[in-house]
Image (cartoon, rainbow, N blue to C red):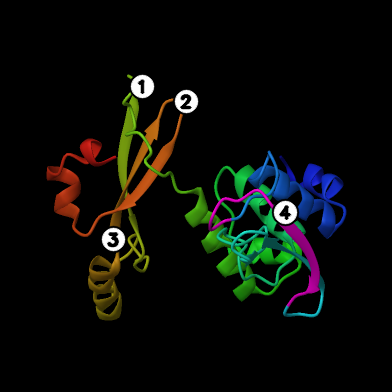
Amino acid sequence: MNLLKVTKTFTTEDAALDYLIKQRWPKGVRCLACDHGKVYTIATKGKTGKPCRLFECGECKLHFSATTGTLFHDSHLPLQKWFMAMALMAEAKKGISANQIARHIGVQYKTAWHLCHRIRKAMQGINATPLGSQGQIVEIDETWHGGRASAAHRRKTPKEKQAARKRSESAFPRTNSHETGGLQVSKGEQRAREILTKPVASAS
């Protein structure tokens, strides 16, 4: 689902909440604690004073909401903006920064940073099968991240030599594994020697 479709589908916060409830409980809302099917809807106000929808279990009297136990839990950000951010991150082939997210959905950088962090964590595969386990071809390459760029086109000054030494200390290697027509995994390594000697494919 792209950003345009998100904005057209979820025109109100209630529409976004109805969608979340339907996706989480396709056969009707059930208690998160005892899984009882007798649940009452309570109209109340949230921490910010805005109307919100709570549920009360008819058996154990637990109060919960549609966002309880999800990445949206305890967030003051509207679900509409959450869905917009998720669409932007899913559509960006080369990734998208928190600054770009902040500009697109109209929030502060700190809010966008935490939002992106939660979404990326939720997107991590749970009990994911290893790359190439179904006979696919897996391509593996390594690269270096961090450090300061040095002036390689001319003779280095003493300060530049010192900066180059710091770069070698602060930069860290990463391995990128890409499954043909499938998933891509990027992992950081503590030491460069591990990239050359450790069987990376077995850990992917």
Q: Amino acid at mark 2?
A: Gly
Coordinates of residue 197 in the picture (x, y in percent): 12, 44
Q: Residues within 10 Å of mark 2 (few under 14, many from 20)?
A: few
* Mark 1, residue position: 136
If you read the primary sequence from the N terminus, does the residue marked by circle 4 or circle 2 appear first? 4
Whether pointer 3 and pointer 4 mark residues with C-beta atoms closer than 8 Å, the reply is no
Q: Is residue 121 above or below residue 111?
A: above
Which callout, 2 or 1, points at the residue further toward the start of the chain?
A: 1
Say which label, 3 or 2, has the lower sequence index: 3
Q: Earlier in the sequence, mark 4 or mark 1?
A: 4
Q: Amino acid at mark 4?
A: Met
- Look at the image and give the residue range highlighted in magenta: 32-46
Indicate the position of residue 7 as horizontal and vertical percent values. 82, 50
Q: CA distance from mark 4 to mark 1?
A: 33 Å
Q: CA distance from mark 4 to mark 2?
A: 26 Å
Numbered circle sitting on residue 181: 2
* Residue at image location 76% in from the left, 57% down from the top: 80
Of tags 4 and 2, which is closer to the observer? 4
Residue at the disc numbered 4: 84
Q: Which mark is residue 172?
A: 3
Question: Which residue is pictured at 39% across the width and 34% down the height?
Answer: 178
Image height check: is 187 above or below 203? below
Query: Judging from the image, what secondary structure is the residue with disc 4 in?
Result: helix
